[in-house]
Amino acid sequence: MTAATNRGATERVRSLGVETTGIEIIGESERTASPKDLFWPWFAANISVFGISYAAFVLGFGISFWQGVVVTLLGVIVSFLLCGIIAIAGKRGSAPTMILSRAAFGVTGQKVPGVISWLVSIGWETFLSIMAVLATATIFDRLGWGGGTATKVIAAIVVAAMIVMASVAGYHIIMKMQSYLTWITGAITLLYVAMTVKDIDWATVSAIPSGSFQQTIGALVMVMTGFGLGWINIAADWSRYQRRDAAGGAIVAWNTIGGALAPSLLVCYGLALAGSDEKVASAIGGDPIGTLATLLPTWVLVPFLIVAILSLVSGAVLGIYSSGLTLLSLGVRIPRPAAALVDGVILTMGTFYVVFVAQNFINPFQSFLITLGVPLAAWAGIMIADIALRRRDYDDDALFDPRGIYGAWDWISIATMAIFSVIGWGLVVNPFAADASWNNWQGYLLEPLGLGTWNATDGYWEGNWAYANLGVLLALVGSLLVTYVARRAKVRGQELARGHASYAPVNR
């Protein structure tokens, strides 16, 4: 096939609105987005009613309603604030997050965090797809339309198709789609709140006893991991189309507001709902969206289901789009739409497996989140420190050249990530030993440090700090501080190597 033929095919794809740009640098003429545009994808992806159900997991740590409110607001806002800082890199480099990560890890070394990032994105998008399928089955069953195998198969195919088609289409169509979904899902979510507020029993909620400081920290870590830290590895993917003169502070602000606004309110409302009814709180683990639907009258179930699916699809689209970019950053040489399609096939297979084979997906998923959350937090700390150290935009060519100023491997960053991951894993535990026995090796530092004791007879950890999951916070903060000190001279050297005349100072 000739070059002219290739160009013609590309133009025909573009004419359909499909984004053909992959991991390459976005051209100046295409950088037309403003910071406020970041509100739409982040808000639409996080206004899912799943946020309400997440409250049951927060209260599961044994804390009170008001402790849960503090944990929710602090955890959600801070975690999305960190996403906003990562998003600054997208504006500076106009490339996907994992390509920009090469400045900190080296062009080849970036594949280490890249694999973890890909797994996290695949996990998130599959999880959201699974919830959409289970919600469909539950609501169809309640309507008397049948919620058995046939319903689940059709739902799985339809949900996967919506996610894959939007992800294959790419950035521009996704941004337009998210702006519409924001209003639709927001309106029905408000309707849900209005129709379920009667189920709140403030006397019961207020009577929930307070938990310890350690239990509160554990809930905080879970909220941070489940919300902002779950998205942090893709934050720059959505800011790479920002104008070069966009203010970094505005990017952080709109990213944080868009991501944190809806879940902050929804989880707080969910705390009141779950705290009012123990049956609702306990049932959420098996089918979060379906359980919330049991509080609604029959006539509103169909619009609730449609919006629940759309909100879950919205979040999954962001994940699969970015997982495709991450796959390309690992060296897979296929077009961006094809990469999204590959991940779509994996999503579909994962959805079918969990829905039709696995008996419980919430517990293994939380264990999965905690496990990958540790190295992801370490990567985030390194990346945030690298962004803070840099005073100038990235060297576009060097991001793709192992012989450039960023080199092939940055052993300081790789060693920092490895060390804090190993230490972090020793300070987190698998609270779902029965459902995720493959993960029972974690927590090996708790007993030596006097922070917990393993009860082999009953299969759980004892001690105030055992379930605080300090390893995630240690990995994040520790790697940030070490990187900021250990790589300061190296970053300065990289910037001087380019020559001050060859690129402009950063617009912070």
Image: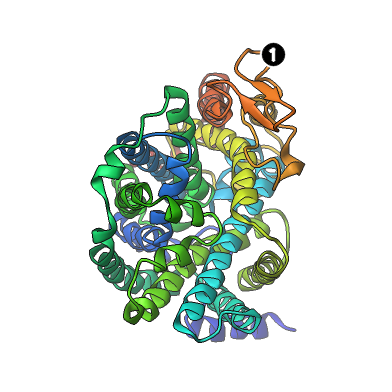
Give residue 440's position: percent from left, percent from top: 73, 36
Q: Nearer the viewer, residue 406 or 256?
A: 256
Secondary structure of the residue carrying tag 1 is loop
In screen coordinates, is 182 left or right of 392?
Answer: left
Task: Estimate how packed mark 1 is, as few (under 14), some (14 to 19) or many (20 or more) residues with alpha carbons within 10 Å.
Answer: few
Q: Is residue 332 above or below residue 102?
A: below
The residue shown at (64%, 57%) is 360
The quarter in which the C terminus is drawn is top left
Q: Nearer the viewer, residue 161 or 357?
A: 357
Q: Quadrant of residue 335?
A: bottom right
The quarter in which the N terminus is drawn is bottom right
Q: Is residue 365 visible?
A: yes
**In this figure, which colouring scheme has been used for the structure?**
rainbow
In screen coordinates, is 212 left or right of 8?
Answer: left
Q: Is residue 23 visible?
A: no
Q: Is residue 123 above or below residue 106?
A: below
Residue that numbered label 1 is attached to = 448
The residue shown at (68%, 17%) is 447
Q: Nearer the viewer, residue 476 or 444?
A: 444
Give residue 157's position: percent from left, percent from top: 61, 80
Give residue 131's position: percent from left, percent from top: 53, 65
Give residue 117's position: percent from left, percent from top: 62, 49
Q: Amino acid at mark 1?
A: Pro
Q: Nearer the viewer, residue 348 or 4?
A: 348
How many numbered markers are drawn? 1
Q: Is residue 475 above or below residue 320?
A: above
The residue shown at (54%, 44%) is 395
